[in-house]
């Protein structure tokens, strides 16, 4: 499996006035942005039921080949972490009521995936991996 995403508590301060950090609302099309010099992109989940930031992360990783950090902020729940990691997120700031130890356990639950994703695009059969 890929490297486990970094989990941050809700008390993590937001980046302000850092030209290397870009905070995006979930209705912004990442393809319209100039990403030169950007080292981290913070994608916001205003509600856990709003998944547009998943699409933004996938676009950044697969189509735009963004190699910097992609961080999830906002209403981030433990239930979303595996899909976040598979969509290209490197880190997540957990909502205040989420237990960071339970979150780590969720990420360790699955050792591999059959399907490809934003991080490992090829499915298992195309990677030559035998179960």
Image: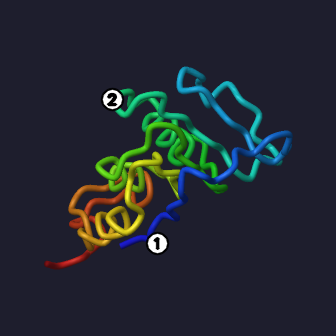
Q: Is residue 12 above or below residue 18?
A: below
- Residue drawn at point x = 68 percent, y = 36 percent: 23
Discs 1, 2 touching: Cβ within 8 Å: no
Counting from the top left corner in percent of width and height, residue 56 is at 51, 35
Label 1 Cα neighbours within 10 Å, binned few <14 / some 14-19 / many ≥20: few
- Residue drawn at point x = 26 percent, y = 73 percent: 111
Image mark for residue 49 = 2
**Image quadrant where one finds the C terminus:** bottom left
Counting from the top left corner in percent of width and height, residue 82 is at 33, 56
Q: Nearer the viewer, residue 119 or 101?
A: 101
- Residue drawn at point x = 50 percent, y = 46 percent: 62
Label 2 Cα neighbours within 10 Å, binned few <14 / some 14-19 / many ≥20: few
Mark 1 vs mark 2: which is more N-terminal? 1
- Residue drawn at point x = 34 percent, y = 47 percent: 80
Q: Is residue 104 above or below residue 91?
A: below
**Image quadrant where one finds the N terminus:** bottom left
Where does label 1 land, which residue?
3
Q: Residue furthest bottom?
A: 130
* Secondary structure of the residue carrying numbered label 1: loop
> Does residue 122 appear to the left or right of 87 in the view shown?
left
């Amino acid at each position: 499996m890929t490297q486990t995403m970094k989990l941050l508590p809700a008390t993590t301060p937001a980046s302000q006035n850092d030209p290397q950090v870009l905070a995006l609302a979930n209705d912004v099309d990442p393809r319209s942005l100039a990403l030169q010099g950007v080292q981290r992109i913070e994608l916001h989940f205003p509600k856990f039921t709003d998944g547009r930031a998943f699409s933004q992360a996938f676009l950044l990783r697969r189509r735009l080949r963004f190699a910097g950090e992609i961080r999830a902020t906002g209403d981030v729940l433990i239930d979303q972490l595996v899909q976040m990691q598979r969509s290209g997120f490197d880190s997540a700031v957990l909502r205040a009521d989420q237990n960071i130890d339970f979150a780590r356990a969720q990420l360790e639950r699955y050792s591999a995936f059959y399907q490809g994703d934003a991080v490992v695009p090829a499915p298992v059969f195309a990677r030559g991996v035998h179960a």
